[in-house]
Image: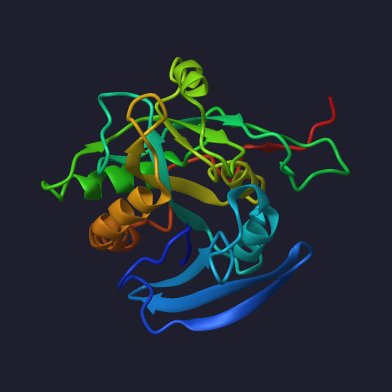
Amino acid sequence: MKIGIISGHSIANLIKDPEKIMVETAFGDISVEVSREKKHDLFFINRHGEKSDVPPHKVNHLGNIQAFASSHVECILSIGTVGSMKKSIQPRDFVIPHDFVDFTKSRQQTFFDDKRVHVDMTNPYCPSLRDSLIKNCKKFHEITFHEKGIYLATEGPRLETASEINYFSKFADIVGMTGSPEIVLARERNICYASLCVVCNMAAGLQNKLTADEISRIYTEKESVISNILQLTIDSIDVERDCNCKNDLSKVTL
């Protein structure tokens, strides 16, 4: 099976001896690292570009997901760094989101700009992939993880204000800048998608100051366990998954 990994950071020891290729898409050429892991082919994309320097509001989401689709990837495991909006979710915790809210403003949201296509997002994250992530997180007793959480996507690149976080926290648990439209585009291309989020800070108003260095430092601290969780999850993914991710696209004209 072909499995995609997408992250804004490197993942140590996961992609072994990769071959770097450029995948041509209608949305630009995308750099992909390809490697073999036992029975699976892995396709790694840094969502922020080959040099990891594209700001969150400029990420080429359509190009990234189309590169996976053109490579015949069936599943995508996404890694994201997030802020917590709930005191019960602390820095260094892991969250496996089950739903999301999109507060982005100016991003291209769909592959379907020339026809009326309506994608069902009742269960946006693949339940089968989520179950695999949950099962394998439980094997690491040294971590705290949350089996459910609502991810809220903001536009960036600035971090949120304390008043925004106070408002957002009424209907979401964690906040990031890249989870959407990535997840929607994956569903539009009939690709199973699940996310493992690393909490790197408390959001504005819940701690005195937020710094990019802190986010990077906590991710680096957790990079090894992220790699191990993904490794076990990849090994446990079934070719036949109990989900409707491939069937949630309606092309009925309303």
In the picture, measured across the screen, residue 167 lies left or right of residue 13, that is right
Q: Position of residue 92 (x, y in %)?
A: 25, 44
Residue at the (59%, 41%) spot, across then down? 156
Q: Say which quadrant the C terminus sits in.
A: top right
Image position, residue 66 (x, y; %): 67, 60
Seen at 55% across and 35% down, the residue is 153
Q: Nearer the viewer, residue 107 or 124?
A: 107
Taking the view exactly as shown, the residue that stands out farthest to the front is 208
Residue at 33% from the left image edge and 44% from the top image edge = 200
Residue 128 visible in the shown view = no
User: Left of 202 or right of it: where is 250?
Assistant: right
In the image, residue 127 sits, relative to residue 70, either above or below, namely above
Q: Residue furthest left?
A: 141
Residue 28, position as x, y percentages in the image: 74, 67
x then y, percent, for residue 31: 60, 73
Residue pictured at 66% horizontal, 66% vertical: 70
Q: Is residue 188 visible?
A: yes
Q: Is residue 145 left or right of residue 120?
A: left
Give residue 9's quadrant in the image.
bottom left
Is 98 placed above or below 71 here? above
